[in-house]
Image (tube, rainbow, N blue to C red):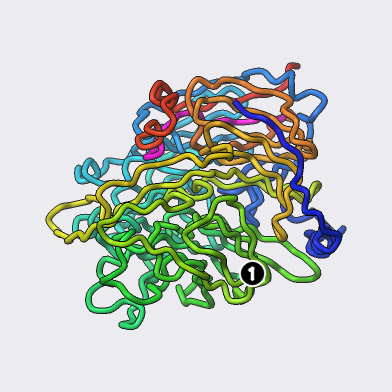
Amino acid sequence: MGRRTSAVDFGSAALIGLALLFAAEPAAAQGPAPGTEDPNNWPQYHRTYNGWRYSPLDQIDKSNVGKLKVAWIHQGGDITHGIQETPIVIDGVVYSVTAGNRIAALDGKTGKEIWRFEPKLDPLTKKVLFSPYSRGVTVGRNKVFIGTVDGRGIAVDQKTGKEIWQVQLTDFANCQGCNFTSPPVLANDVLTYGSTGGDLAAAAKIFGVEAETGKKLWEFETIKQDAESWPAESARYGGGGAWLPGAYDPETGLVYYGTGNPGKDFVGTDREGDNLYTDSVIALDPKTGTLKWYRQEIKHDVWDYDSAYEALLLKKDGKDLLVHLNKSGFVFVMDKANGSLQNIWRLSDTINFAKDIDAKTGDLIGRLDPPIGTTTVICPSPFGARSWNPGAYNPKTGLWYVNAMEICDGLTPVMQKTDPKDYGTPHIGSEDFGKLQKVAGHAAGRLDARDPITGERKWTYEMNIPSFGSVLTTGGALVFNGDPLGIIRAFDAESGKVLWNFNTGSGLRSGLISYAVDGKQYILVPSGWGSYAAILMPALFPELEKVPGASTLIAFTLPD
């Protein structure tokens, strides 16, 4: 299925020196180091605000990971679109969400269900493009919060699962199915919700909500009302959904979101301009929704290169940095205080939509805009150089472990009229989603161990089928990663050697986590292949046609 390769030979002492210069700084000695606080829990989407997906737990390590056994299994119910969540764990209780926004609280030692909450959803959700999947919940202030697939925010009691409040945020019936597929961000006493919208005939928004009461405080339009950026009525269908969880940074007091692609993905003739704030990183004041700064990574996107991915926060040479990947295959390193560029590096080995990028300005050089009515092979494909599932950063190794894909797509843009009566249909400006193609001489997928600031690669594990799950790294010098066939692997974080594997029975499209209860460490794996990757990828990888659906949590631990 895969093979490990050594680091790329950069052949330059100067480049090696640059890598050392840009290496992430070790944490200060006073108090818990960033990313290591609250080690027994997984209290938020990325575990800590800095987006590392690092568990400092080290009971399971390189010497004993091969002894892992199944501790418990929980079936979530509806398997439609699989399971895409990152579970939350606080004080031995697992908070899980599955298709249809079904929330369950489970005993972290046994998997036994403590309570369950299932909202009654609008019947229109059956027509919505992005339904019924949910990527997680948010827990805090004695409540469990979700964003629903019919555009609501809901809070339930953390101990009982009983509803406390709900608020309708999107104009679900008139917004072509604008909804929430990811959990909100809790910034002290304010929740921020980012809506879908990139592939719909709609304009997306981010909402601020009072966490205690559900009162809507503000709206931020991710589509800038500016005729130069959006001529005529193009802003009405602008897209730009902030459809993945943002990140609240208590150091700056800002919440960071990545935004998605413009509507009518592959046709830009009726939206000439930069199309702000699509394909951008934006920093908002969570109290007011005021925009503090933005960095547009892809101007006038005609390739569906969302920038909705996670914000990785690091320190280097006294600077506070934000590392951010988008679908294009370029990784942007910027100052988290103002978005100024510090570096740009390539994750993808196969990029042809542009000849290069200006590392000082971020401007694309030599764009390849697909002409209307003609099939053009574009690399990376609209699935991106990586899917939305996050990588993981280990402060002990200083490496970012991130999946990558080398897949191109034959796209044929077509003019497409918008009919508001045609509810929830894709608004992509293409005959189809293209014809996916492998790249000769390249493995279709791989797991890289990279310096997140310079992009220098230490090791690579190549895969015949790319991974579509999130990565986990731990204090036990381990990296965990799963694939669409259902195999989860544990790697040596330093060398990339495979130390353990297990067949979960269905593909991985979710977030792996680690937690501890009563001094015992667990690795928790959500298993259940789904999403549009499961629908479209079998054309390129026939093995995926036979992967069974599931909605299962599998907890692993060491023998007593």
The answer to whether 264 appears left or right of 545 in the picture is: left
Residue 117 in view: no
Q: Is residue 57 left or right of residue 162?
A: right
Q: Residue at x 74, y 47 (%)?
A: 8
* Residue at image point 52% right, 23% down: 112
Q: Locate the C terminus and report the quarter of the image it occupies.
A: top right
Q: Quadrant of residue 160?
A: top left
Q: Quadrant of the N terminus?
A: top right
Asked if residue 525 shows in the view, the reply is yes
- The secondary structure type at the circle numbered 1 is strand
Q: Residue at x 75, y 64 (%)?
A: 315
Viewer-closest of 427 and 470: 427
Q: Position of residue 67 (x, y in %)?
A: 74, 18
Residue type pointed to by label 1: Met
Pinpoint residue 251: horizontal percent, then vertical percent: 67, 68
Spot occupied by residue 232 in the image (x, y as percentages of width and height): 23, 78
**Numbered circles on residues, count:** 1
Quadrant housing residue 452: bottom right
Residue 59 in the image: x percent, y percent? 78, 31
Magenta highlight on residue 397: no
In the depicted structure, whether residue 94 falls above or below residue 23 = above
Query: Extreme left residue here?
Result: 421
Q: Give the camera-side residue of 15 and 27.
A: 15
Highlighted magenta segment, given as a residue range: 521-533
Q: Is residue 4 above or below residue 306?
A: above
In front: 253, or 213? 253
The residue where tag 1 is placed is 334
